[in-house]
Amino acid sequence: MAYLGPTTDAGSAHLQHALFARLHDFGYVEGKNLLLERRFAEGEYDRLEALAAELVAFKPDVLFVSGTQGAIAVSRVTRSIPVVFVTVSYPVAMGLVRSLAYPGTNMTGLVNPSDLLSRARLHLLKDLVPKAKKVAVLHNSQNAVESLMLAAIREANEKLRMSLAQLAVTSEQDLSMAFDALSGMRADGLYVIESPLNFMHRARIIESVSEEYLPAVYGFSEFAEAGGLMSYSISLVEQFRIAADFIDKIFRSAKPAELPVVQPAKFELVINVKTAKALDITIPQSVLQRADRLIE
């Protein structure tokens, strides 16, 4: 088996645990009956294809990959090795599968419904700050998938009629400049897109946001757990856990082309009440009542 991650080994340790603990439940144990090769891009998208090629050369029975850019990279180097993906946005539009119901390629897995979530998060931010006039959006301009997310955010904003300002970053070094720009733009809130780059540097981003005393909404609960104000997302841990079911089926000779891509049935709104108090932000009762989890 091969494993390709877009971030770091340490930063995704809890997700790897979910995947391999579930595989252990199926009887697969690394070092006994599971031979495993791992590679991590550490947030550098331009490394993904080379790392994917390294893993393909290993000739695994199945290749696991996290994230849209990683899945695209894998698709460029193999159309034969079975691939299981998680947290992939727009898999049909990206040419990874022919349809969700019948993938028809060497790939299958679980999607991240970015269109739906992008719209919902912007509305949540507006509900949190009803008087907001201007919202900044932190995104990676080198990630083609994020251009589709930005389009969904702009579409949601047609009714909200706020001013949207883009903060483009392509590396950790860009974050300082982005937050310097944020300081001068007098934004009423911040939307942090759930890119691997932002995920990997979430602690630094959250610290910078707190210094601005700015309401912010994030993708993935890991941001709220790390001190971010609010997140609305799929469960990454659950996606990694369910991916093990796909891997087990493929080990038992199932074909990815015939395994329907899974869409999440549940989304989770997490609010960090402790952070709200520290930032002197009052969470409207209407938002608190919708929360699935409060961090206090």
Image: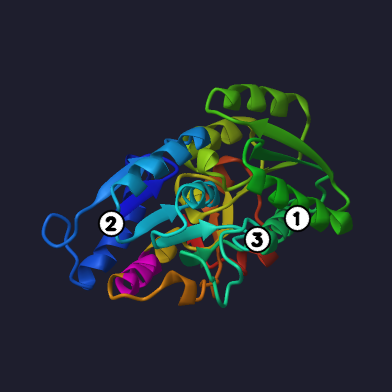
Spatial distance from mark 3 to mark 1, Cα to Cα?
A: 9 Å
Q: Residue 195, relative to residue 87: is it above or below? A: above
Mark toward the start of the polypeptide (3 vs 1) = 3
Secondary structure state at the residue bearing disc 1:
helix
- Magenta range: 241-250
Residue linked to disc 2: 1
61 vs 31, nearest the viewer:
61
Residue linked to disc 1: 152
Asked whether 82 falls inside the magenta stretch, the response is no
User: Where is residue 101 drawn, in percent x and y?
Assistant: 57, 77
56 vs 22, nearest the viewer:
56
Q: Nearer the viewer, mark 2 or mark 1?
A: 2
Q: Quadrant of the N terminus?
A: bottom left
Secondary structure state at the residue bearing disc 3:
helix
Amino acid at circle 1: Ala
Left or right: 124, with 12 as reference point = right
Q: Residue 266, relative to residue 187: is it above or below? A: below
